[in-house]
Structure formats: C-alpha cells, structure tokens
Image (cartoon, rainbow, N blue to C red):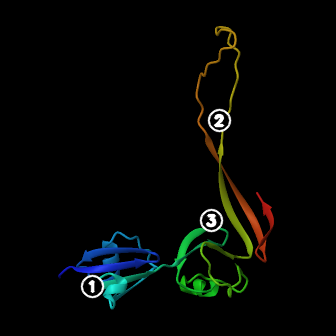
Amino acid sequence: YRAAPVYVSDGISTYTTVTAAATPRGMVAKSGVTLYPEDRVTVSAVDNLVLQQAIGLRAVITRATPVKVGLYGALAVAMRTQTKTVGDFIREKKIVVTPADTVKPALATPISSNMQIDVIRNGIHTITVSEDVSPPVQTVTDASLSFGATAVRQEGTAGKRTNTYEINVQDGTEVSRKL
C-alpha cells in the first residue's frame, strides 16, 4: 500500500492526514478523530483543488445524533442514531415495544440532539434501590479528658441499606409504590 493524502471534513472542522488505510473509517481514524459506530464516513476524490485546497481523497463525516434512552424504568443510557423519528430509532435499535407499553415522546416525533426517549412498560415492576447509611455516633463522657476536648475511640464506616419496591405503572405514570 502507498500512503495518500486525505482531507477529512467533520462539520466545520477539517483535518489533513497521509494514510495507507484502505477503509474510510480507517482513514479518518488515522487523523485522530473519534468516530462512533453510528457515524457515517463517505470518501470521494477531491474534484476542485482550488476550492477544497487539498489533493487526494476527501472523507466527509456525517455525525449521528446523540439521544438518551430510558428503557422500562432504568436509568437513561446515551445512544446515537442516524434515523429521523423516534419510531425509526426504536426499530433500528430493535427495542421491544408491546401494545401495552408507552413510548414518550410519540413514535412520529422527529429526533433532536440529546432528546430523552422513554419506553415505559405498564404493570407491576420491582426495583431495588441502595442508599448509604451513615455510621451511628455515640457520645460518652470521659472525666480523664480536659474540659471541651473530644476523642474518637472507634471510627465507624458507612453502611448500605437496600430497599425493594413494588411499583404499579399505568399509562406511563407510577400509580402506587409499596416497600
């Protein structure tokens, strides 16, 4: 393989690199640009040396739109997509949605950057929540210490308490919660 100059266009940023990589993604990776699996890279020959101020190949990155997805009550996870609507996104990621589930926002809603998409399963769920518990403090009067002085005899450590809740969800809204 012979190295060739590659002009990388990433939105308003441009980079130039020399690489022998055979794939478009490999060419872009050589320039040090971070790519996500959903990002698209197209390569073409530079057709106008004066306007593009480059020779060789031109790699154009089409960035995927980042979204946050909460599935069935779990914490939101960051994902990326090239799709245009929430419904297309759900089909692309193969998210199982039953007729009784609620999708917020609606399936026809256009995808926008950093939007929150929630798939809420109606019915009874159980969730487990862990919380920190501070160590108990016990004050003991000790006549051997001078007035106003304090001393720690044994340092306690924080503990954890785990609570399990049974949650009833109807139409995407929590109706009841039982410990």
Foreground mark, 1 or 2, reads 1
Callout 2 amino acid: Pro
Residue bearing mark 2: 135
Foreground mark, 3 or 1, reads 1
Q: Residue at x 31, y 81 (%)?
A: 54
Q: Residue at x 64, y 8 (%)?
A: 144
- Residue 75's label in the rendered image is 3
Residue bearing mark 1: 56
Does 85 sit above or below residue 120?
A: below
Foreground mark, 3 or 2, reads 3
Q: Residue 161's spot in the image, x, y percent?
A: 66, 48
SS label for mark 2 = loop
Quadrant position of residue 19: bottom left
- Give 171 or 154, whichever is nearer the viewer: 171
Q: Residue furthest front?
A: 50
User: Decide: marks 3, 1 in contact (CB < 8 A)?
Assistant: no
Q: Residue 117's spot in the image, x, y percent?
A: 65, 75
Q: Residue at x 30, y 85 (%)?
A: 57
SS label for mark 1 = loop
Q: Earlier in the sequence, mark 3 or mark 1?
A: 1
